[in-house]
Amino acid sequence: MIEVCRSHFYKIILGLVCALTLWQLLVLQNVQERVFIANFQYNISNIVNHFSSEKVSNSFSLPKETRSAGGVNFSSFWEPSNLYLRNETEFGNSSYDLCPETPINLDGHITVLKTSPTLEELESHITNLMPGGRFKPFHCKARHKVAIVVPYRDRKQHLAVFLQHLHPFLQKQELDYGIYVVEQIGKSLFNRAMLMNIGAAEALRQYDYQCFIFHDVDLLPEDDRNIYSCPEMPRHMSVAVDVFDYKLPYQGLFGGVSAMNRSHFEKVNGFSNMFWGWGGEDDDMSNRIRYKKLLISRYPANIARYVMLSHSKAKPNPSRFRVMKNGAKRAQVDGLKNLRYKRVKIQFMKLCTWISVDISPKERS
């Protein structure tokens, strides 16, 4: 009798496993069909949208029509793994419950690797991304839509280490995110702040993000409880950095890694476009936040910890203090409102969206 019951039990279990497997296959097929259709629509719309003017200005608000700023790499739109989707409903997770407020798979302190494969090798290792370095969780609906904006020039090895570290870090936090690398071409002095303005504007051309994380490429978070969510107040993220003995250098600091929701970023008129060379732009933003009676928030120092990758120190901007003197008056017009640049190329790569821009004076006139 016992053997007969056991036999029936095994048959029931086997039947349930087969039914579950069939259901998963049907769901996967349905998602893939929706992905293919949405991807086809996206590819067509991108080709149409990229036939337009070269210069870009006053472009922060999500535009009613898309304007291009230069050449187009059409091949990136036809990657076999294209899963870049414009709307949550197209991806099929809109009916899921919201992800938990506190992700359940966090480890706390995490190991930071300061070496990585090349970007090309890394692409074959990280395979769960949509083109453009986009990701959203499959099992729940993300609470935050976050654009990671990385100002960039000549740091290819740092970028590989950064992407290797940040993608799994962000995915464990169950965010709907994209990484945007904004490369300054040409020989003009580096303008980190303007690149961050451009990154925010270009990210909004692709998706309806709720907030921005402005992230230096040489800073890697050490604790995954340092949640890259959309903040209620502007948040300084890189509170404790190893090269500063894990201490905050001064209270008004807003550099390294910082987060702002979209409404606050618009309210302060973004970053200044006038800081050429190293230094000053973060303190200027800190002042802009104060002018608008906002407060800078921070996570505890034992969580907001970062490792800085080694690099040669940039030459300070000798005019940064002079530019900062009239900051309150200048903030009304200098920033998103007078943003001018030429977008030379945009590539939806596997690990990030790469935006090359020319911000030399002749291209901004």
Image: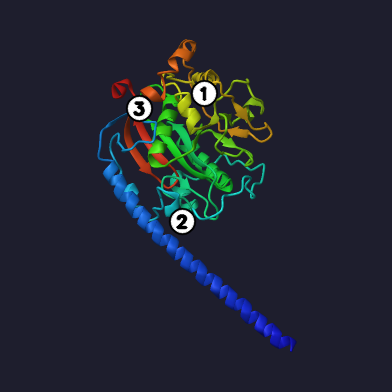
The residue labelled by disc 2 is 92
Q: Secondary structure at mark 3?
A: loop
Question: Pointer 3 and pointer 2: residues touching (CB < 8 Å)?
Answer: no
Question: Which residue is located at x 63 percent, y 21 percent?
Answer: 249
Relative placement, left or right, of 66 versus 201 is: left
Q: Secondary structure at mark 2?
A: loop
Amino acid at dot 1: Lys
Q: Nearer the viewer, mark 1 or mark 3?
A: 3
Q: CA distance from mark 3 to mark 2?
A: 34 Å
Q: CA distance from mark 1 to mark 2?
A: 46 Å
Question: Pointer 1 and pointer 2: residues touching (CB < 8 Å)?
Answer: no
Q: Residue 298: x and y, percent?
A: 62, 30
Q: Residue 283: x and y, percent?
A: 53, 19
Amino acid at dot 3: Asn
Q: Residues within 10 Å of mark 3 (few under 14, many from 20)?
A: few
Question: Which residue is located at x 31 percent, y 23 percent?
Answer: 364
Quadrant for the N terminus, please.
bottom right
Q: Residue 115: x and y, percent?
A: 54, 41
The residue labelled by disc 1 is 313
Residue 130 vs 220, above or below: the answer is below
Q: Residues within 10 Å of mark 1 (few under 14, many from 20)?
A: few
Residue 318 visible, this angle: no
Q: Which label was assigned to residue 40?
A: none
Residue 181 vs 349, above or below: the answer is above
Quadrant for the C terminus, please.
top left
Residue 62 vs 243, above or below: the answer is below
Nearer to us in this view, 62 or 152: 62
The residue labelled by disc 3 is 58
Nearer to us in this view, 353 or 189: 353
Of mark 3 and mark 2, the one earlier in the sequence is 3
Nearer to us in this view, 204 or 123: 204
Q: Secondary structure at mark 1?
A: loop
